[in-house]
Amino acid sequence: MFKGLNRQNELTLHNLPGFHNRTEFFRIAFGAGGILGVWLYWRNRVRRIAAPPILLPWFLLITVLAGLDLLNDFYRIHKQFDRNIHELSEVVEMMVGLSALLYAWIKFREPVGGPPG
């Protein structure tokens, strides 16, 4: 049933009707949230849950590419550029998943008291 609703016949929420081709805002929010999480790393009170600074390039790239994708929805630049940005959106979705996995892996490996510092 779920697979039948999905536009790309995948087990993902972002391809359901209503979400399909509207995920730029989610990707921008994830990237901006990650950037905020890295900024919070230098605040001792929340360091245990803050994003490690090593993930900052991931969050910046996710935010920039998703922003270009959103901009491209309103202002068509060039046919080949449009196609490339669309293809990159799949890479950005993968980067979102991998950066979340890296966050969890790094946090799991930290000492119980949190990161040194």
Image (cartoon, rainbow, N blue to C red):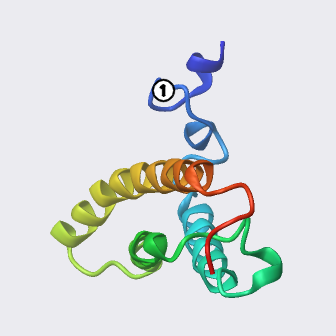
Q: On the picture, is 55 further left or further right than 85? A: right
Residue located 57% across and 18% down the image: 3
Image spot of residue 28 (x, y percent): 56, 71
Q: Nearer the viewer, residue 18 or 48?
A: 48
Q: Is residue 59 visible?
A: no
Q: Nearer the viewer, residue 80 or 10?
A: 10
Image spot of residue 97 (x, y percent): 49, 48
Residue located 40% across and 82% down the image: 75
Secondary element at tag 1: loop
Considering every residue shown, the one lying at the far left of the view is 80
Residue located 56% across and 57% down the image: 23
Q: Is residue 89 above or below residue 12?
A: below
Considering every residue shown, the one lying at the far top of the view is 1
Residue corresponding to mark 1: 10
Q: Is residue 3 visible?
A: yes
Q: How many marks?
A: 1
Count residues near mark 1 (Cα–Cα under 10 Å), then give few for <14, some for 14-19, many for 20+. Answer: some
Quarter of the image where one finds residue 38: bottom right
Amino acid found under the numbered disc labelled 1: Glu
Q: Is residue 60 above or below residue 101?
A: below
Q: Is residue 32 above or below residue 100?
A: below
